[in-house]
Amino acid sequence: MNAERVHRSALALLLLSLLTAGSTLAATQPYPTRAIRLVVPFAAGGGTDIVARTVGQKLGEQLGQQVVVDNRAGAAGIIGTELAAKSAGDGYTLLMGSNGPLAINPGLHSKLPYDPLRDFAPVALVTIMPFLMVVHPALPVKSVRELIALAKSRPGQLNYASPGGGSTTHLATELFKAMAGLNIVHVPYKGVAPASTDLISGQVQLLSGDLSTLMPHVRSGKMKALAVTSAKRSTLAPELPTVSESGVPGYEVSGWFGVLAPAGAPREVVVRLNAEIVKGLGSGDVRERLAALGGEVAGGTPEQFAEHLRGEIAKWGKLITAIGLKAETGR
């Protein structure tokens, strides 16, 4: 009987040992052990989607797990961003964030179903996309300084186009107006294409937009480029000065994309993802794809991305309040 009890005790100890070892092994398995979902809060085929698929493919190759892009479009990026914000913070759901949903929406909407700073852990800033400031070729200006002088001599007579009220490029020109002290009339369109068409036809005189979209029109002579909106000259158009060095010191506006995880993601997972994304940004094929979109590689630490995000929210919130812009009006 004693021998039987000893045998049972030994079996119990062995089973406990195996269970403990299994749990420990599971807990120490390197991340990731399954596919990762990368939420894109816009439709397939757009800029956000292309950046996400470029980064996701490279990240999946490096991690040895598939990165699945999940397009959840709607409500100016709110639907997909909310979905990501409310997902488990385990590193298996990520968000391809951008300035619209994360930095501009907080100023436009009094009630958002997510807080960009509270509900997300920034992982890595992927790319910065400077805008190009262009005018109609017949406008008698060759620089930003000359544009400012002309606008001041003709207050309220010049028009500028945007792809929609509340868009980054709309706010880019509003910031330019505010910093230069100009009175230029906003004409919103439903997209970049119709805005570009009316600029080419002379219905409007000024437009800011993506380098990749507007530069072909500049090269064909249908538009005249004055400057880039980034803090430094763009490597994609180094011959063009910045707005800041052309008469509006301190002016800086760029589109950007970055990867974020839901709040609560383990620090070691965030660090691992950051390292792999930054590594991937160094590869030639990723750089080429981003350059084709008019983007320059960013990178940096999660802390630097978090600082960038805080600065963007503050800048656009201040401007939106100053001009009285609301999501409902899109003035």
Image (cartoon, rainbow, N blue to C red):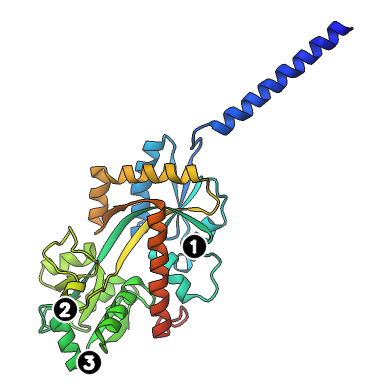
In the image, 92 versus 216, the foreground residue is 92
- The quadrant of the picture occupied by the C terminus is bottom left
- The quadrant of the picture occupied by the N terminus is top right
Q: Residue at x 24, y 66 (%)?
A: 231
Residue behind mark 1: 117
Residue behind mark 3: 157
Q: Residues within 10 Å of mark 2 (few under 14, many from 20)?
A: many
Counting residues from the N terminus, which is met first, the one under dot 3 or under dot 1? 1
Q: Is residue 38 visible?
A: yes
The image position of residue 314, as x and y in percent, is 41, 72
**Does the residue at mark 3 contact the one at mark 1 (Cβ under 8 Å)?**
no
The image position of residue 280, as x and y in percent, is 32, 43
Q: Residue at x 20, y 91 (%)?
A: 152
Q: Residues within 10 Å of mark 1 (few under 14, many from 20)?
A: some
Q: What amino acid is at disc 1?
A: Leu
In the image, 182 versus 207, the foreground residue is 182
